[in-house]
């Protein structure tokens, strides 16, 4: 499997670069079009055949060349071309449909009708981007470096600007920096770029190096006020941050607090200040579930709320990130429905219920209006790891496949006491516990159910190693899956490559009309070594 992963690292980015092949070919061709001829000359007033149809503009500087004697191969006597003599420079003054007027003040020799006018590639251009995600920006600039007719230079008089459209394509314009004159514009849809057609595929993938930590939960968002993408990754006791740079994942600090037993973390901007709050749910003293809210401010994470009696979880509703909450009793049972969690009038509060049954727990939960009828369907992964789709309180669909299995869970001490008796608690550390009692009481952190802006459902599938021993929760492989809803059932749209052994958490991220996945993988580095973690980035749309 290590060989397969290595090939992914090498080959898939090459495919990602090729995604811009048609766009960069158009740019290469566009800069070769600024070639024409001198039509007439009177003093230093020159008429050219370059008009509006060729994209020239007033103030544009071009060079004048003249064909000279042919270049003849000494052996084959084949004519290879003609020598070009540099005549001078000209500046376009006025542009009309099929011709333009120009002047030339810098001449090495007299201009004649029939002389060639050209930009003399490579043409210097500055490159700017608007609404281009950081990873795509790097891939695009890498591909632009292969375009033969341009030379990227920040001080260039022409500006090549790329923008990501909400519908998924990429447009670009060429403008003259000084005057702001639009020289050329073009839009490429995903279909034009060979990325559409109703199918999904892994368009890009990036792996971090192995991390010497066993992270169990992750969240992705704008954790600091610099608009960069950060991954928060939690062990049982600590939360670390990594900045996603487009080429990798760079350590970016930690939350300055030791936690008791973290179960899951979330990132979302509920207070609207453009910095995501960090929601931390943990088991304290083995007896209660409590949550806290933090936000990064002036160099560190500050605690905004503490000791909240909720479990928090992120959901994506048609691509919009929300936080939902559910209360848990001291005996581990759910109290009430899953509710929206809001920030209203300078305070955090629980909003309206989004589930219709208290039997639907917050782990393995999601919702969205996938039928398009104005009411939301609820998704929930049950204790058999089947994905159920609810319409109101009725189960409309139950999957055959299993989803959302993870190795992480928690047990509350009061549950054990109520289930058996206090003697089991007293012998808890003696190895005399009934394993079936504990298995029954484990509350697994089921995988997330996300719905993107195209109403596609995102879930994880972890394959158990010992299928006859379901309680072991030892996994041999993982993959991510995307499904669409046809009104009656979920239909497979895409599956990721198989990864070994376990994807323990994942997060969706939507930006500028594209969907990205960030995954947290745990793996063993050998029998005598501890588990390690790896962060993975995948673009799917």
Image (cartoon, rainbow, N blue to C red):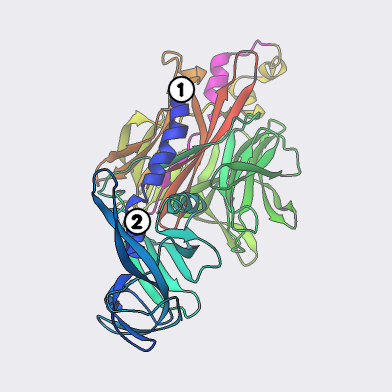
Report the Cα–Cα distance between label 1 and label 2.
Answer: 33 Å
Secondary structure under the numbered disc 1 in the rendered image: helix
Identify the residue at image location x=52%, y=50%: 324
Instruction: Tell me the residue that label 1 is attached to.
Output: 3
| Residue 232 location (% of width, % of height) | 62, 43
Q: Is residue 34 shown to the viewer in this render?
A: no
User: Is 384 covered by the magenta stretch?
Assistant: no
Q: Tag 1: Cα neighbours inside 10 Å, few (<14), some, or many (≥20)? A: few
Left or right of 113? Residue 439 is right
Which quarter of the figure has residue 283? top right
Instruction: Tell me the residue that label 2 is attached to.
Output: 23
Q: Is residue 270 shown to the viewer in this render?
A: yes
Which quarter of the figure has residue 188? bottom left
Answer above or below: position of 352 versus 387: below
Q: Tag 2: Cα neighbours inside 10 Å, few (<14), some, or many (≥20)? A: many
| Residue 519 location (% of width, % of height) | 51, 37
């Amino acid at each position: 499997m290590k060989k397969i992963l290595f090939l992914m690292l090498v080959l898939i980015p090459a495919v990602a670069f090729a995604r811009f092949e048609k766009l960069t070919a158009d740019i290469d061709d566009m800069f070769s079009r600024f070639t024409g001829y001198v039509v007439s000359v009177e003093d230093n007033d020159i008429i050219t055949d370059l008009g509006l149809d060729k994209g020239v503009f007033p103030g544009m500087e071009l060079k004048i060349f003249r064909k000279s004697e042919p270049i003849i191969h000494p052996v084959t006597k084949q004519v290879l071309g003609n020598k070009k003599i540099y005549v001078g420079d000209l500046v376009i003054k006025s542009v009309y449909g099929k011709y333009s007027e120009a002047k030339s003040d810098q001449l090495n020799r007299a201009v004649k009708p029939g002389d060639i006018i050209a930009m003399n590639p490579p043409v210097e251009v500055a490159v700017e981007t608007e609404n281009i995600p950081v990873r795509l920006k790097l891939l695009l600039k890498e591909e632009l470096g292969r375009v033969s007719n341009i030379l990227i230079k920040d001080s260039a008089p022409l500006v090549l600007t790329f923008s990501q459209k909400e519908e998924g394509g990429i447009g670009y314009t060429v403008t003259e920096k000084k005057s702001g004159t639009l020289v050329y514009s073009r839009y490429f849809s995903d279909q034009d770029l060979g990325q559409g057609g109703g199918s999904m595929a892994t368009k890009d993938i990036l792996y971090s190096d192995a991390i010497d930590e066993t992270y169990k939960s992750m969240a992705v968002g704008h954790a600091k006020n610099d608009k960069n993408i950060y991954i928060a990754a939690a062990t049982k006791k600590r939360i670390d941050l990594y900045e996603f740079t487009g080429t990798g994942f760079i350590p970016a600090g930690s939350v300055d607090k030791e936690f008791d037993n973290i179960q899951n973390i979330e990132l979302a901007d509920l207070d609207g200040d453009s910095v995501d709050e960090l929601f931390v749910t943990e088991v304290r003293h083995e007896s209660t579930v409590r949550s806290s809210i933090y936000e990064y401010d002036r160099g560190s994470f500050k605690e905004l709320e503490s000791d909240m009696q909720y479990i928090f979880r992120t959901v994506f509703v048609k691509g919009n990130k929300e936080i939902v909450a559910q209360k848990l009793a001291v005996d581990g049972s759910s109290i009430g429905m899953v509710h929206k969690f809001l920030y209203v009038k300078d305070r955090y509060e629980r909003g309206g219920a989004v589930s219709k049954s208290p039997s639907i727990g917050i782990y393995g939960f999601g919702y969205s209006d996938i039928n398009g009828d104005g009411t939301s369907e609820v998704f929930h992964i049950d204790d058999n790891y089947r994905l159920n789709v609810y319409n109101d309180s009725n189960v409309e669909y139950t999957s055959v496949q299993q989803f959302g299995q993870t190795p992480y869970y928690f047990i509350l001490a009061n549950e054990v006491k109520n289930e058996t008796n206090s003697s089991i608690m007293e012998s808890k550390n003696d190895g005399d516990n009934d394993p079936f009692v504990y298995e029954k009481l484990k509350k697994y952190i089921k995988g997330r159910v996300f719905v993107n802006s195209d109403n596609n459902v995102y879930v994880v599938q972890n394959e158990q190693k010992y299928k006859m021993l379901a309680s072991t929760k030892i996994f041999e492989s993982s993959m991510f899956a995307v499904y669409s809803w046809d009104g009656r059932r979920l239909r497979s749209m895409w599956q990721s490559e198989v990864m070994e052994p376990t994807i323990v958490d994942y997060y969706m991220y939507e930006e500028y009309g594209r969907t990205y996945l960030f995954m947290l993988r745990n793996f063993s580095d050998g029998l005598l070594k501890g588990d390690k973690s790896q962060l993975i980035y995948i673009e799917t749309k």
